[in-house]
Image (cartoon, rainbow, N blue to C red):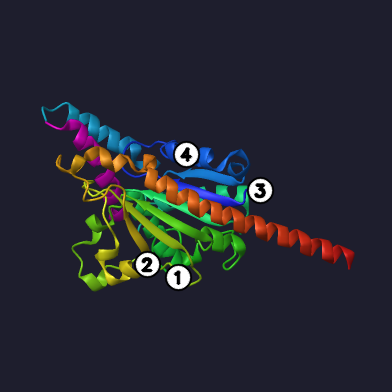
């Protein structure tokens, strides 16, 4: 079985199962085949159920004489998804439920490949950060009246079991948010009502690293958002220094929002965290084997 789970959730753009492939390729090259084989890498497709509707609207708009049609379609894939997810949050089987079911299914698949105790590294991009934040928020509450965690969670999984804890992301080790759009959806709230998921209470203990490009109009730093975010987020990283004017004079850069999977800074940070986790998992495995030998001798 795999030692570590890495799950990637896409943000804006058409559904693409291979969106994180540039980052996975860099990991394989950096780790080597032996350590790479110890990983389970999967994708979470939160908006597959919305794809046809978004494409239909995009096709209809292209029949009109409009400027920036590609930019408009890009916005559709981001804003329409979040609006649809939140519009029917209380409805059983609605878009909010379906989005969470996709996350849950991705976790179930990972658990089958790596077991319930495997540490998880979560990579989320753009509106994917909002979707996974909603899932985590609900999973961290003792009771909720919406989403798949209402009524104690899906049937067939015993509350408090190893599988339940895994599906609630309680083995989450690191969360990388890449170009998160979170502020776009909560900036209108009073500061004390802008609440982040917890990273170090309620049975959770993970390091939240946020990456943003200073010229990406959709990617934001998160620590300044509220005291809650400041406490939960370990650090905001600029993928390009604000002092670097070689590209900044161009103003907002739409392509920057899609560039996080190729970012050398993201790749380097992830490799460092993975090496530490792999070493820890290897040490733990050796300790377990030694204990097993002692028990067998006794």
**CB under 8 Å between discs 1 and 2:** yes
| N-term-proximal mark, 1 vs 2 | 1
Residue located beneath label 4 in the image: 26
Main secondary structure of the magenta stretch: helix
Give percent across and percent down for residue 292: 80, 62
Q: Which mark, residue 200?
A: 1
| N-term-proximal mark, 3 vs 2 | 3
Residue at x 31%, y 49% (from the top left corner): 179
Task: Identify which residue, 65 or 124, lies in the foreground.
Answer: 124
Residue at x 23%, y 29% (from the top left corner): 59
171, above or below 274, in the image: below
Q: Which mark, residue 232?
A: 2
Residue at mark 3 to residue at mark 1: CA–CA distance: 28 Å
**CB under 8 Å between discs 1 and 4:** no
Residue at mark 4 to residue at mark 2: CA–CA distance: 28 Å
Screen quadrant of the C terminus: bottom right
Give percent across and percent down for residue 32: 58, 40
Q: Which span of residues is magenta-colored? A: 67-88
Residue at x 52%, y 63% (from the top left corner): 170
Residue at x 55%, y 52% (from the top left corner): 275
| Circle nearer the viewer, 3 or 4 | 4
| N-term-proximal mark, 3 vs 4 | 3
Q: Badge 4 local density, few (<14 within 10 Å), some, or many (20+)? A: some
Q: Is residue 198 visible?
A: yes
193, above or below 62, in the image: below
Q: Is residue 41 magenta?
A: no
Residue located beneath label 3 in the image: 1
Residue at mark 3 to residue at mark 4: CA–CA distance: 22 Å
């Amino acid at each position: 079985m795999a030692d570590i789970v890495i799950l990637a959730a896409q943000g804006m753009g058409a559904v693409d199962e291979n969106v994180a492939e540039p980052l996975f390729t860099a990991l394989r090259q950096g780790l080597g085949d032996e350590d790479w084989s110890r990983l389970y890498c999967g994708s979470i497709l939160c908006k597959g159920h919305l794809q046809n509707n978004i494409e239909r609207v995009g096709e209809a708009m292209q029949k009109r004489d409009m400027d920036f049609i590609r930019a408009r379609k890009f916005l559709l894939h981001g804003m329409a998804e979040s609006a649809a997810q939140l519009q029917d949050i209380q409805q059983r089987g609605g878009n909010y439920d379906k989005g969470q079911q996709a996350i849950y299914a991705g976790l179930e698949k990972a658990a089958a490949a790596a077991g319930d105790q495997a540490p998880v590294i979560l990579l989320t991009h753009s509106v994917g950060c909002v979707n996974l934040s909603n899932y985590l928020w609900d999973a961290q509450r003792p009771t909720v009246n919406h989403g798949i965690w209402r009524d104690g969670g899906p049937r067939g999984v015993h509350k408090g079991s190893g599988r339940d804890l895994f599906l609630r992301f309680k083995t989450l080790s690191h969360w990388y948010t890449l170009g998160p759009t979170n502020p776009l959806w909560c900036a209108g709230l009073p500061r004390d009502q802008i609440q982040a998921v917890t990273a170090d209470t309620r049975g959770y203990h993970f390091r939240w690293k946020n990456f943003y490009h200073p010229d990406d109009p959709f990617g934001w730093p998160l620590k300044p958002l509220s005291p809650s975010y400041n406490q939960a987020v370990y650090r905001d990283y600029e993928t390009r220094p604000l002092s670097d004017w070689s590209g900044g004079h161009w103003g907002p850069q739409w392509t920057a929002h899609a560039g996080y999977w190729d970012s050398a800074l993201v790749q380097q940070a992830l490799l460092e965290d993975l090496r530490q986790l792999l070493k820890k998992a290897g040490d733990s495995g050796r300790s377990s084997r030694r204990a097993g030998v002692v028990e067998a001798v006794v």
